[in-house]
Structures are given as structure tokens and as C-alpha cells.
Image: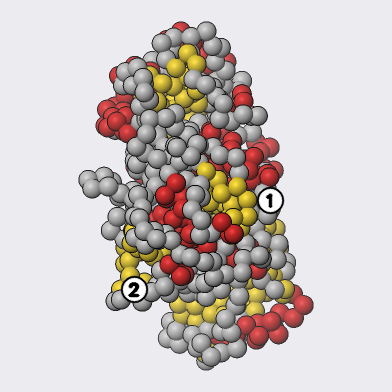
Amino acid sequence: MLVWMQFYHDSAAPSHTPNELCGVSGCQITAPWRGGYVIELTEQGLRNLRGRIDNPTKQAQIDISNILNIEPFTSALQREYERHSDLASQAYRDAENRIWVRFTVAPYISTDSQNAVCSYLEDVLRDAWILPPAEETLDQPRSRDLVPAQGRTLTLYDAGRSQPKTLVLGLSRTDRISELLLSGSIGRWEPITTPRSVSPGAGREPEELPYDLDRAPIIGVIDGGYHANSYLNAVAWQSDKLVTDDEADRRHGNMLAAMIVDATRWSNSLPIPDLPCRLGIVQAVQRDDILVTPVTAEDLVLHLDKVMADQPETRVWNLSANTPFAAHEFEVSEMAHLLAGVCRKHQNLIVISSGNREPGSPDIISPPADCDAALVVAGRSTTGLFEALGGKCDISRTAFGPELMFKPDLSWFSTHRVLGGATVRGSSFAAPLVSRLAAHCFEHVSNPTPDLVRGLILNAADLPKGKYDEHLGYGSPVLINEPWNCPPNMVIMAWSEAMRAQQSYYWTDIAVPPSMIKNGRLVGRVRLIAILEPTVERAGDEYFSIRIQTNVRHLPQDKEKWTGLLGTEKPTTYEHKARKEEQKWQPVQFLEKQFTETNGPFLKENRLEVGARLFWRHRFLFEDATIRERAHEATFVLTLESSDSEDDTYNQFRFMMGTEIEEMGISIETEVDNEE
């Protein structure tokens, strides 16, 4: 059986994992869940746990004091389902009135329990219909026919592991969801929906293409295809169609394609960078007014896996379509999870719209905007007669994602004149602006990686002090006209490192240019962005299993020890406050301070250093060797900016660093302090 141990709010830190209390025979912690833990117990394990509670060790007493409640996992699941049962109405219904839902089986570890779950589901799903796993038909991802579950052998676990698999089922009645949750065989569910786009206007198309696009970068446009005439010369490639022309949202696809190529000309009253791109067409977004088998997350990602392999020169992919419902409070959607995996596999960057909210619906971002590897873009209004950036877009969905995921990342103009002559509004039309910038960034940076490009674009975000805004993210990437180039009064350093836990990393001897020193004080702006490629887990919630902690340090004039300038080395903030205010357990760390002649620190040496460490949580999910040896790529972007735009900060820095610096990167010695 599975039980849920609910912990008090102030016991969320990984150090409070009840290892001692649950360290009895027949008792295993299988997954984190809703601020507590899911525990698998045998009958003997239940007796052993009761005995440990009756006669606890000193550490077990501490574990017990952190527990708010213990109840069957099924009871907690059912209560949550009742609270969110309206989600079932968002699920796709086919022509036979079947409701389509994705289920993840419960996170059992013992082989006997896993086998029992499979046998039970094979028996009770005789009247259900099942969409076979995508990997069963790798050669024909769209030829998968719906089949009855009856007579199928279900393989839903990898032996001895708590990372369960999923089933996509067509059910005759909505109350079957509740029945399955109460059975103890299911650990998670989400409705199957087709990501929706924004409806277009109509009108006359432009008559000619004003650009020479032969060398322009290519963006993979995952939308309703391209079916207009104006920009056919901009189409670099078209993949096989995942959805038919009749199913595809062709109007929206046409509009998005036109913006990728020609946004500056269409919305010529807006200060949009003139960065035309070519088109790679992936016809995969369906209209929402027809009854057809929906494109599932597995369908889309399997198709993209093939297309990305065939088009290695296309490094940026745009998806301006979202589900009609908000992201879950705790759990990352399957589509977001799979998109992150396929993009990292092919070293590509995906840009996703945050989604648009409908009247009466929540403001929270819509899947797959909960994709941690993506640049997620919300809308932003204008001020005056379209000449400047304003505040939030009233219909754009906003933060936060699951587990306080800091999404959206960015925001940009969301009201545009589009193909057909209509004026439309939505996050769909903000995302292509970022995609264009990212594609040109890939072209101009040597040895680019998705996280390096992501870091450089975030580094150009305009909100002051690196302050995250729930509506705007970190702002619009307009602070630096070309994020891959340094203005004269600015230095941008970017580098990557394969990091391991239990070690401290330092990048030392970073010169502070003279233009940033006034009367011995550091004066100007310092910004550090760190992006970690994380290990994630799907057994429960708390998606990220590892975090990065980073800071910038200086040597004060009257001290012998280097101290923090940005960030912290040993956080002391209450766990839940740190998660929201200090980005704890977020793969992206964004730190910034502005120093003046009155608050800038006095420097003993005109040098800075960057430090970083990795920390795991929920170690019970991983082998000790994995925790000790697994390397995680971390990308850093450090910016030093003088307060005077006329200063020659960039050249001063290059002179001071000499042979230690190269264009858009820096060779800095890494000191590794082994700490067990």
C-alpha cells in the first residue's frame, strides 16, 4: 500500500526527509508529493513503522515532529481530484463521446506491487480504449490506431524503479477517473487536449518579399503549417505533416510564419529589431472546432525528434500554442517534460508562448509553457502611440508554473498587425519576436549552445535589478540591441562548466575595469545569470532534483576574506520564502545589483570572482554513485556595466585580462574544493 506523510509547511527542506523514521524493513520512501512523501508499505512494514513510532530513536523523534498528517495516498488523490474535477471538462471528447485522459501509474518500487497494478489495470480497463505508446510505432508516428485495452499486456514499470510510465485512455464516463484514482493504481492524471492558437482576422496579403533571405537563420515553426503565397520563398524546408490540411489551424500558421519573416514590416509602428528569418514548417497544431484524434504529447515529440534530426541547422523552434487550462500547481505537464527532453537531445532551443486566458479562467501559464528548457514569452502592452514598452498584456497568462517555476521568462509586444491585415493580440505573437532574436544570436556566437543563447537573451532583459515580475518575467530583451555584442561601456562574459555535487567551483581573477571604480568604490551594474541543465524526476512532484547556488564575490578593502557581492554562499532564508524570492530550486539564477558612489563597496583589489555549487534533494531516488559522479552542464553569463554610457569599459577589460579573454567567452581558472 501507499500512504502520504504530509509535513508541516516549515519542514519542506530536503534535510527533513524522514530517512530514520522510514528506515525499517518493509517501508520505502518512493516519491516527494505535495510537501510530504509517498511511502510504500508492506503489511509487516506497517507494523514495523508503528513500532518505530511507539519507540522512536532520537532522530526518528525529530522526523515525527515534522509530520502533520498520515493518510492513504488514494484518499489524498481523490480529495485533490474533487477540488480540480472541472479539468475533466477540458479533456478531448471524440466522435464516440469518449473522454481522453493521460494516467501515470502509482509510484510503487516493489516488483510485487508493480505486477499487481499491471494485472489490475489489464482487468478493469476491458471497456476502455487505449492509445498505444508512441515508441511502439516509431516508423509511423501518425498511423497509431485506437485499440481496445482488452487483451493487452501492460508494461508500466521498469523493474525496481519508481519512475512510472503513462497510459492514454479513452473512457466512456468521467467518473471512471475517480474509480481509477481510488483503486490505488494511479498516481497522476491530466486531460488530453490539443494546444490551441489564437483565431486570426482576414484581409489582403503583402505583394512582395522585401528581404534577401539566402543567409538568414531558420526557425522551426510548430503551428498550423504555411498555406499562403507571400512568403513561399522564405520556406527553407517543410516536414511531413503531423496533421492533415483539413485538421490544421492554417490561418494561425500563416500569421506566425509571416511574423517570423516580416514582423518589422507588419507592425512598423513598433520598435521591433529588423531580424528576418527563414521558415521551417512543422504542421502540427490542430483547429479546436473539429472532432479528430488529438495530437498527444507523445505524437508531437516523436515527430519533432525525427524532424530535428533531419534539420540540424535549425537551432530555434517556435511553438505559439497552448492548452486551454492552467499549469498544475505541483506537476509539470507531460508535453512540457517531453519537449525539454527532445530539445536537449538535439541541442536546440524552443520558444513557447505563455498562453492566453479566457474570461473567468486562471491567469497561470498554460502547458507546455511549463517547459523548463524553453524561453517562455508572455505578452506586453505599449505606451503612447505604440512607440515604447508598457506594462502587462491583459489577456496573457502569467507566473507561476508548477512548484513556483519562474515562467514566463520574458515578455514582448503582443498586439500586432498580421497577415490578412487584422490587428490581433496574444502571447502567440510575442513569442516569434524572441525566436527571431534567438536565431540570430545562434548565428553570431561562436560554439553556441541553447543555454548560452538563452542566457544572453535573458541578459538583455530590461527590468531593473533583475527583479522578476509575475506578468512580465524579467522583461523584454531590449537592454542590449544585439545581445551577442558588448556595448562600449559593458563587458559580457559567458562560459560553461560540467559541474558535480560535493564540490565548490570558483572562477577567479576577473578584472574590474577602471571606469567602474570611483574613489575606491565599485560603481555600476553587475548582473550574473546561471543556467543549470538539471536532473528531473517524475515519480512524484518537486520536478527538479538538483539546484545550483551561485554568487559573485569581492575582497573588501578592510578584510582578508572574500565576501558576497551578489547571491549567497550559505542561504539562511526560510525554505518556502527562498523558493519564491531567491529562485531556490530554479534552474535559472538571475542576480543583479546597481552600485553608486555612495553604496558601492570599497575594493581591496580590483578583481571579482564567481563561485558555484550543486545540491541534490530526494537522494532516496538515486544511487550514491549518481549523486557523486553525475556531471551537470552549467552556463554562466556575467555582465559588468559602467554607469556612464561613454566609458570604454569593454576595451579596458580586454587590456587588463590580456590573453585570458576571448570573444564572448572567458578562460578562467576553476578551483575545485572537494567537500564530502
Residue 94 numbered mark, or none: none
Among numbered discs 1 and 2, the one appearing first in the sequence:
1
Q: Secondary structure at mark 2?
A: loop
Nearer to the camera, 244 or 630: 244
Residue at the spot 56% in from the left edge and 84% down from the top edge: 489
Residue at the spot 52% in from the left edge and 72% down from the top edge: 274
Label 2 near label 1: C-beta < 8 Å?
no
Vertical order, 301 against 232 (above or below): above
- In the rendering, at what x and y percent does residue 245 appear? 48, 39
- In the rendering, at what x and y percent does residue 456 appear? 57, 66
Residue 94 occupies quadrant: top left
Question: In the picture provided, is 476 more to the left or to the right than 173?
Answer: right
Residue at the spot 56% in from the left edge and 33% down from the top edge: 621
Which image quarter is the N terminus in? Answer: top left
Q: Amino acid at mark 2?
A: Phe
Q: In this figure, which colouring scheme has been used for the structure? A: secondary structure
Disc 1 and disc 2: Cα gap in Å?
37 Å
- In the rendering, at what x and y percent does residue 381 appear? 33, 66
Extreme residue toward the right, this view: 659
How would you rate the neighbour count of disc 2 (Cα within 10 Å): few for under 14, some for 14-19, many for 20 or more? some
Residue at the spot 48% in from the left edge and 34% down from the top edge: 295
Nearer to the camera, 46 or 530: 530
Q: Amino acid at mark 1?
A: Pro
- In the rendering, at what x and y percent does residue 404 appear? 40, 49
Residue 513 occupies quadrant: bottom right
Residue 312 numbered mark, or none: 1
Q: Secondary structure at mark 1?
A: loop
The residue pinned by badge 2 equals 386
